[in-house]
Amino acid sequence: MNRQIRPAPVRKTIHVDIPPERAFDVFTKNIGQWWPKSHKVSQADLERPVIEPFNGGRWYELGVDGAQCDVGKVLAWEPPRRVLLAWQLDQDWTFDPELITEVEVSFAPEGGGTRVSLEHRNLERLGDHGEAVRKRIDSPDGWGLLLKLYSETAAK
């Protein structure tokens, strides 16, 4: 019997016209250039998000006031092929060090560019709130918008 995961993972794929090495760097090292200031968890205005470039590194927000607010951590850093991030935000977008849902982003050569595939999974770990969180991150303002902004930056 094939059991369906509920809530289902959110999956998004786009193509960017740059090689995987550059696509990986734009997504990770240059996340502050494309991540919208409106998508933040801290009370402070967002300066930029930061993904530290190593296994076990932090994923956090840097506020314009210098404050830092954790989002998660780096579970796997494998440039230029993939990055696996722990998303440690609960249903209220509050950091929970005991909670881990995973955001895996892979970068595969395709034509003259790169196919970027994102999967946000393990949403069932949010319990009764999993489906509501899934709807938010799969909404027009969720991962689809973020990947659109990412691809626009990658095209520059």
Image (spheres, helix red, strand yellow):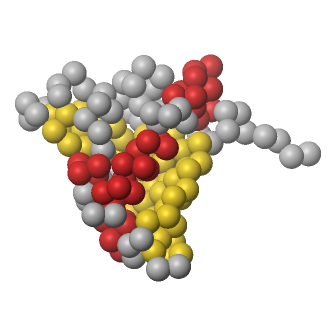
Placement of 16 over or under 70, stated as above or below: below
x then y, percent, for residue 118: 52, 53
Q: Residue furthest bottom?
A: 112
Residue 78 placed where, x, y %? 41, 68
Which quadrant of the figure has residue 30? Answer: bottom left
Give the residue drawn at x 10%, y 34%. Answer: 64
Residue nearer the viewer, 77 or 37: 37
Q: Is residue 55 visible?
A: no
* Residue occupying the point 51% across, 28% down: 136
Left or right: where 36 falls relative to 15: left
Q: Quadrant of residue 9?
A: top right
Residue sitting at 33 percent across and 62 percent down?
154
Q: Is residue 119 depicted above or below 112 in this figure? A: above
Residue 48 shows in the view: yes
Which quadrant is the C terminus positioned in? bottom left
| Residue 117 on image: x %, y % | 53, 58
Image x and y of residue 148, in percent: 42, 49
Q: Quadrant of the N terminus?
A: top right
Instruction: Name above or below for residue 134 compared with residue 106.
Output: above
Determine whether, in the image, residue 52 is placed left or right of residue 114. Answer: left
Camera-side residue: 139 or 120? 139
Residue lying at the far left in this picture: please name it. Answer: 65
107 w.r.t. 11: above or below: below
